[in-house]
Image: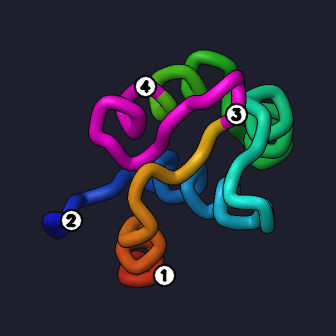
């Protein structure tokens, strides 16, 4: 994966997704977790859409997953 610049919101989204051991989480659960950290509804949709179209995440049966595990390395670079 090319070195990608991530916004603070995108990093927060991806880090929150990392915290789920199964590698996937329902959109509602992730949205609730991010709202607790200051995300607003429109911000969740905007970030989710950007990461989805960038191929970083996928959505299967309402669950958000990582499309490419190399994203974890990218997140670590931004710590």
> Which of 7 and 68 lies nearest the eye of the viewer?
68
Quadrant location of residue 18?
A: bottom right
Separation of residues labelled 4 and 2 (CA atoms):
18 Å
Q: Nearer the viewer's eye, disc 4 or disc 2?
A: 2
Range of residues picked out in magenta: 49-63
Check disc 1 and report its element: helix, strand or loop. Answer: loop
Up-down relation of residue 69 to residue 6 (above or below): below
> Which of 19 and 43 lies nearest the eye of the viewer?
19
Binning the other alpha carbons within 10 Å of mark 3 as few (below 14), some (14 to 19) or many (20 upward) gives some
Quadrant location of residue 19?
A: bottom right
Residue 37: x %, y % from top left: 77, 48
Query: Mark 3–mark 4 contact, CB under 8 Å?
Result: no
Q: Which residue matches tag 2?
A: 1
Q: Which residue matches tag 3?
A: 63
Separation of residues labelled 1 and 2 (CA atoms):
18 Å
Q: Is residue 12 left or right of residue 23?
A: left
Q: Which residue matches tag 1?
A: 79
Check disc 2 and report its element: helix, strand or loop. Answer: loop
Q: Which residue matches tag 4?
A: 49
| Mark with earlier residue (1, 3) | 3
Binning the other alpha carbons within 10 Å of mark 4 as few (below 14), some (14 to 19) or many (20 upward) gives some
Binning the other alpha carbons within 10 Å of mark 2 as few (below 14), some (14 to 19) or many (20 upward) gives few
Q: Which mark is residue 41?
A: none
Residue 38: x %, y % from top left: 73, 41
Binning the other alpha carbons within 10 Å of mark 1 as few (below 14), some (14 to 19) or many (20 upward) gives few
């Amino acid at each position: 994966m090319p070195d990608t610049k991530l916004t603070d919101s995108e990093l927060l989204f991806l880090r929150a997704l990392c915290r789920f051991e199964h590698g996937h989480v329902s959109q509602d659960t992730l949205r609730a977790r991010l709202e607790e950290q200051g995300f607003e509804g429109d911000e969740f949709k905007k970030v989710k859409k950007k990461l989805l179209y960038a191929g970083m995440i996928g959505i299967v049966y309402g669950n958000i997953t990582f499309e490419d595990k190399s994203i974890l390395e990218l997140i670590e670079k931004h710590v």
